[in-house]
Amino acid sequence: MGNSIGLMFGLPGQGMHLHLDALSLLFVCILLPQTVAAALAGMRGSFTFWLFVLGMALALLAGDAFTLIFGFELMSAASWLLVMQGDARPATLYAGVAIFSGACLIPALFLPVSSLAFVLIALGAGAKAGLAPLHSWLPRAHPAPPAGVSALMSGGMVKVALYVLIRYAFVNLAPAAQPWWGVALVAAGALSVLIGALRAVLEVELKTVLACSTVEHVGLITVGLGLALYAKATGDAALSGLALQAALLCAVAHGLFKPLLFIGAGEVKHATGTTSLNWLGGLMRGMPRLGALMLLGAACMAALPLGPGFAPAFLLFHAAIGAAATGGILARIGFSGLLAVLGIGGALALAAAVRLIGLGFLGRPRSLHAAAAEDLRRGPYLAMALLGVLCTPVALVPGLILELLNPVIMLLAPQADAPPLSYAPLTLLLLAGLAALAAGFVQTRWGTRGLREVAAWNGGFGRPPAWLPFGDPHTQASATGFAEPVMRLLGKGLLGTTLADPAERFLLLPLFRLQTRLIRLAERVRRATIRERLAFVFAVLVAFLLALGLGQGG
Amino acid sequence: MSLTFSLAHLMGGIILLCAFLQLSQRRLAAMVTLYQLEALVLAAAAFWQGYAQHEINLYLTGLITFALKAMLLPWGLREIVQRFNMVRAVETALPMAAAMILGLALIGIAVLVVLPVTMHAISLTREDLAIALSVVLLGLLLMIVRRNALAQIIGFLSMENGLVLAAIGMPGMPFVAEFSVALLVLLAFLVVGVFLLRIREHFDTLDISGLEDIERRGR
């Protein structure tokens, strides 16, 4: 599958080239359904939207560096316009990140094959993909534009950035590959998983929750890629193939369920006027179809067994365990720590999904708007249904999808003998059921006898207290309250009481201070008196003369 | 031959001494007098070089220097000093002693730079170049260590004298350059004279620290 086309326009004398191989094809296939879904969800009339899609397609199909960077920047610019239509403030932050990313990528694409090129690629693509510690713009910028664009940004644009990372780390820069490249990616990915999952539990806005979850999934994919890169550099072919399977399958699954959730969030906003979980509730009654589809998406987000998110998570744990069993003592300790981080991330993702469904769609409505919500419009319904249907094969027959991924893995890690996934969902279901039965048996047989009466959760549809016969909705647990245990356990330690992202505190704030200091310096120079300026020029002249004289003398 | 060198070096030395003494003078009138002496010696040096190099242009340079810098400019400067009633002590930004020590260091630097750099050049110009560079640096220093605008102008003029000294010592320097430099200095003098009048009108003094204050407070 090495098909190239030369285009008649582009750089003078060179033109632009399109090239389709297995990797491009995979990412185009990831991009296609969500583009159709976003168009169905109401974006098809927007010229900027199609420009955005064109940029992504161009970046994926690029056959030379110029085309790649052209498509990438076209994507950035168009998505910046789309974000600005939603909200101007994150748009500025987003533009800054996009410029930083471009400034890293453009020199990297034309550098010789070296570690420096990889670092620049990782910084540029990582910033665009929302990889920690350059992720803090993502939960601000992704929720800003209309739902269709949010869906495509979260599901597609992030993948394009990861595609650039994969293309360069595994193919173009492969001759210079070092094990520490993989370790660096794993570290960044693990950090993203932790922060993304934690913030997904704590945030109140529905779309922000989803964006934070995107950070988490980008982290998962990057951990997979990093493991594969590490294994490839150390010559462990089987592990490399396994980790690549995990990463790519995770990308496929995320590209399906995240747009679904974002479009659903947009519909929630359309029907109720808000996406704040503190003002929603009970939507499952008014919007049953949306509720069912969102339930499906949330199950995927939480990587529940029999959902599409489970197989990649399973493979990833498999790969991490494999990596922890090889290498020196430091590698063993490090990868064991990675396992713990992935476990925490998985648990937090589950909590986030439960909170999303439990507070947004179950329980009593917390506002009149939520009570009066009407069900899905036709376009978004079709879009979400399409994505939901496409989720099914990923969920139930991941082995088939992995077969299809084989050419890509062969391309990325030529010596990998990709083992077919030893993952049978039905058997697993049987085992899980047996385990649950055994646990229940143990619980009833040897569990505590004492009785304790507590208010029933009742699937969230709790009865109002007796002294409020008409049921004040705010007597239910709020989204903030639901997240409080997690907040106490992890949030205060990692994020502080203000819920500010650590990246903002440790990265953006110092940058801001540096800028202020430079401005002060510039102002000081501008206000220098005539004598001070003269003295400065004079001092430079004398220093120059001294250097000249001493250089000559010595 | 040796007389040519000796006289040229003597005149250069007197010019350098004048430039250096300007640093030590508190009174504007004395500075103007020193400047006049400097310009006179410069004119004489130009005549001498013209005689030694058989260059008509250098006579012309000497004539311009004599008329413009030794006569017209000092007269104008004295006029300004009289009219603004500034026959009094000059305020300095740096103590005299420190300024003079700095000046000595600058002369040392100039010699240190010029002598090794021009090792292979004709020996006639080497010492002259060192002296000229010293005069330029001393003029710059004078502009920095004085707060009074008139003293800064004198520093500027003295610096220009250093440039002319370098030009006449160098055989084959085109006359146009010197002529344009002289004209430029005259124009600058006129402009600055008008400027001084304006400063005086606004602040009743030529001490530019008032200006600096305004600048520092922000426009």
Image (cartoon, coloured by chain):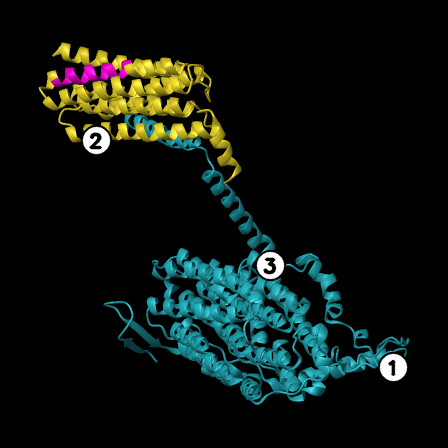
- The magenta stretch spans which residues? B37-50
The chain that hosts pointer 2 is B
Q: Which mark is residue B180?
A: 2
For residue A36, side relative to residue A457 (left or right) = left
Nearer the observer, disc 3 or disc 2?
2
Q: At numbered mark 1, what does the secondary structure look like: helix, strand or loop?
A: loop
Q: Which mark is residue A333?
A: 3
Q: What's the distance in space between the residues labelled 1 and 2, CA to CA?
A: 100 Å
Q: Amino acid at mark 1?
A: Pro
Q: Which mark is residue A469?
A: 1
Across and down, in percent, residue B95 comes to 46, 17
For residue A455, side relative to residue A515 (left or right) = right
Residue name at image x 23 percent, y 24 percent: B164
> Of marks 3 and 1, which one's residue comes earlier in the chain?
3
Nearer the observer, disc 1 or disc 2?
2
Q: Quadrant of residue A70?
A: bottom left
Rendered hue of chain B is yellow
Q: At numbered mark 3, what does the secondary structure look like: helix, strand or loop?
A: helix
Q: Quadrant of residue A476?
A: bottom right
Q: At numbered mark 2, what does the secondary structure look like: helix, strand or loop?
A: helix
Q: Nearer the viewer, residue B122 or A329?
A: B122
The chain that hosts pointer 3 is A
What type of secondary structure mainly makes up the magenta span? helix
Q: Nearer the viewer, residue B85 or B139?
A: B85
Rendered hue of chain A is cyan
Q: Amino acid at mark 3?
A: Ile
Q: What's the distance in space between the residues labelled 3 and 2, CA to CA?
A: 79 Å
